């Protein structure tokens, strides 16, 4: 049986930046409020000609280049996204065509902010079971397309972007374990309505609704539990983890998970200040940044975790 090893990472952030200050003229909000409550200063927003698949394409090509793998060798593409180009076909299918890959399996995973962790968990199982040899695992979000820019509870929080990894069958240790959970009783706390079904009136759009404070409380408790679960599954101690790469939803949530791991904040990869919450893209965006700037090195142990609408949450422990 093979292991699944991350052999390359890549990411993409759109050029346009929206700062907290930019919101002050259109909303009853302030840079001070947003930064103090979330840790966010700015976020990237896609241009009209861009899409989730176009961001994913750039991130994927960067990851392929880093891995030294040609798109034609890829036999599995999984995209974690809640803001797909179309309801169907999947963004993964559209991406496969853009990359010039053909014939392998390609599908999306809709697990809100945990989309990348879920996609990584699924690809890991595929590779271990011999169902794929070289996979592209991606988190990509055009959150700005599902935000109501008059709702200060959501629009200041989220940003756009994409992150990707190439996962290859290997005899070396790679993904050590992944853990995925969900609890649908919380579906009304964080969701995007479905304009196809709702059909309130013509022209209805899909918008995100979030009861942030209720989400916050469950997220802190749940993520603390999953840290224990992940370490126990691998017979590891907190001190065995070199890096925490968390979903970037709120600096206060991230700090509480780091505290649980007795991990100094220098060992936590943070992108939230400059990127905001990019949902399924946040973990692979942070991973790519830390790999490219030399912080995360081959052989190190990385704990990734995420929590999002559903609720769905998950973690992955990876030897790089
Ligand atoms: O990524 C998926 C998972 N999502 C999360 O994990 C998000 C978790 N939640 C959070 O990060 C936080 O709950 C938020 C940052 C979203 C909100 O922070 P909070 O400290 O929980 O604030 P709150 O929702 O309790 O709101 C406090 C006050 C309210 O006013 P009143 O009712 O006290 O008068 C809000 O209306 O802050 C108000 N408020 C704002 N004020 C200025 C809400 N949004 C804003 C805003 N600017 N943008």
Image (cartoon, rainbow, N blue to C red):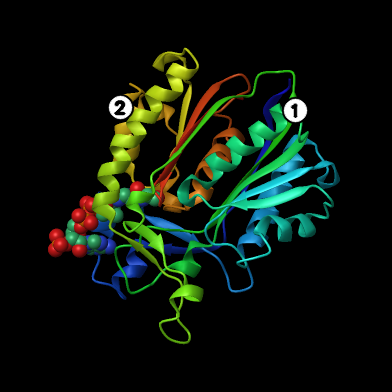
Q: Is residue 214 above or below residue 63?
A: below
Circle 1 Cα neighbour tier, 10 Å, few/some/many (<14 / 14–19 / ≥20): many
Q: Is residue 48 above or below residue 89?
A: below
Q: Secondary structure at mark 1?
A: strand
Q: Residue 169, labelled with which disc?
A: 1
Q: Please, which residue is most extreme toward the bottom here? A: 202
Q: Secondary structure at mark 2?
A: helix
Image coordinates for residue 105, horizontal then vertical, percent: 75, 48
| CA distance separating discs 1 and 2 | 34 Å
Residue for point 71% across, 31% down: 127
Image coordinates for residue 201, horizontal then vertical, percent: 43, 86
Q: Is residue 124 above or below residue 153?
A: above
Please state if 311 lies on the left or on the right of 233 as rendered. left
Residue for point 28% across, 58% down: 211
Q: Residue 250, labelled with which disc?
A: none
Image coordinates for residue 183, horizontal then vertical, percent: 38, 44
Residue for point 46% across, 49% down: 113
Quarter in which the C terminus is drawn: top right
Q: Which residue is mark 2?
A: 259
Image coordinates for residue 188, horizontal then vertical, percent: 33, 59
For ligand 1, which image quadrant applies?
bottom left
Please name whichever residue, 255 or 176, is drawn nearer the observer in this view of the structure.
176
Q: Is residue 153 above or below residue 81?
A: below
Using the rendered image of the protein, determine whether residue 35 is visible from the camera's viewpoint: no
How many callouts does the rendering have? 2
Please name whichever residue, 120 or 61, is drawn nearer the observer in this view of the structure.
120
């Amino acid at each position: 049986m093979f292991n699944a090893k991350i052999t390359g990472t890549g990411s993409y952030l759109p050029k346009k930046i929206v700062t907290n200050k930019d919101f002050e003229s259109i909303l009853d909000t302030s840079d001070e409020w947003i930064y103090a409550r979330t840790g966010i200063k700015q976020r990237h927003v896609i241009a009209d000609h861009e899409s989730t698949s176009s961001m994913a394409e750039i991130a994927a090509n960067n990851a392929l280049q880093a891995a030294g793998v040609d798109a034609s060798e890829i036999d599995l593409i999984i995209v974690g996204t809640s803001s797909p180009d179309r309801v169907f076909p999947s963004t993964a299918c559209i991406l496969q065509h853009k990359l010039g890959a053909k014939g392998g399996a390609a599908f999306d995973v809709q697990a809100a902010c945990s989309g990348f962790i879920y996609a990584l968990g699924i690809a890991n199982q595929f590779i271990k079971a011999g169902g794929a040899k070289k996979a592209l695992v991606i988190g990509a979000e055009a959150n700005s397309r599902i935000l109501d820019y008059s709702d200060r509870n959501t629009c200041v929080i989220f940003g756009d972007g994409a992150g990707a990894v190439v996962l290859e069958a290997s005899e070396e240790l790679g993904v050590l374990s992944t853990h995925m959970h969900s609890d649908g009783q919380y579906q009304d706390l964080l969701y995007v309505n479905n304009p196809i079904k709702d059909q309130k009136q013509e022209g209805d759009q899909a918008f995100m609704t979030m009861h942030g404070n209720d989400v916050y409380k469950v997220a802190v408790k749940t993520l603390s539990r999953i840290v224990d679960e992940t370490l126990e599954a691998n017979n590891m101690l907190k001190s065995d983890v070199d890096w925490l790469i968390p979903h970037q939803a709120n600096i206060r949530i991230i700090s509480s998970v780091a505290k649980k791991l007795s991990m100094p904040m220098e060992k936590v990869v943070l992108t939230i200040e400059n990127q905001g919450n990019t949902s399924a893209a946040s973990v692979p965006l942070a991973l790519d940044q830390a790999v490219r700037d030399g912080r995360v090195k081959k052989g190190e142990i990385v704990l990734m975790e995420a929590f999002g609408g559903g609720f769905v949450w998950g973690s992955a422990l990876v030897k790089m």
